Image (tube, grey):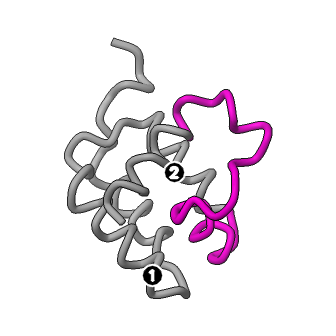
């Protein structure tokens, strides 16, 4: 099994959850639900994809979750990011 498919370790997961804290309540709620559902199975590769989404502003992230905007062109063929985004959308 490649390293990117390994489950993220507890320390890295804690750091990711801390980084996922947002200034917008709606995003906090979605991300909390996401972690409640997926934290036990979150892979290193998925965590990296989530970090890329977390680089967005609060408004841009929420617009993606609510499907008000399309993903960035460079992400449209990135199945890892699209998978995480879909998971975020399903927990909303």
Query: Where is mark 2, residue-wise?
Result: 50
Q: Are marks 2 and 1 in contact (CB under 8 Å)?
A: no
**Which residue is the extreme one toward the right?**
73
Q: Quadrant of residue 9?
A: top left
- Residue 38 horizontal side relative to residue 50, left or right: left
- Residue 89 horizontal side relative to residue 56, left or right: left
Residue 80, how many percent across, how many down?
52, 33
Residue 52, compared with residue 61, is above or below; it is above
Q: Quadrant of residue 91?
A: bottom left
Name the element at disc 2: helix
Whether residue 74 is in magenta: the answer is: yes
Answer few, some or many: residues within 10 Å of disc 1's Cα (few below 14, many 20 plus, some between 14 and 19).
Answer: some
Name the element at disc 1: helix
Residue 36, how many percent across, how many down?
21, 62
From which residue to which does the magenta span run? 56-81
Query: Where is mark 1, residue-wise?
Result: 26
Residue 77, compared with residue 14, is above or below; it is above
Q: Residue at x 42, y 56 (%)?
A: 89
Q: Residue at x 70, y 38 (%)?
A: 75
Q: Nearer the viewer, residue 47 or 31?
A: 31
């Amino acid at each position: 099994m490649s390293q990117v498919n390994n489950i993220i370790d507890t320390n890295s997961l804690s750091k990711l959850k801390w980084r996922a804290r947002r200034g917008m309540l709606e995003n906090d709620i979605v991300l909390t639900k996401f972690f409640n559902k997926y934290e036990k199975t979150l892979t290193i590769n998925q965590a990296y994809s989530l970090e890329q989404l977390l680089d967005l502003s609060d408004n841009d992230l929420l617009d993606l979750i609510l499907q008000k905007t399309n993903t960035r062109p460079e992400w449209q063929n990135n199945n890892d990011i699209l998978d995480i985004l879909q998971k975020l959308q399903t927990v909303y």
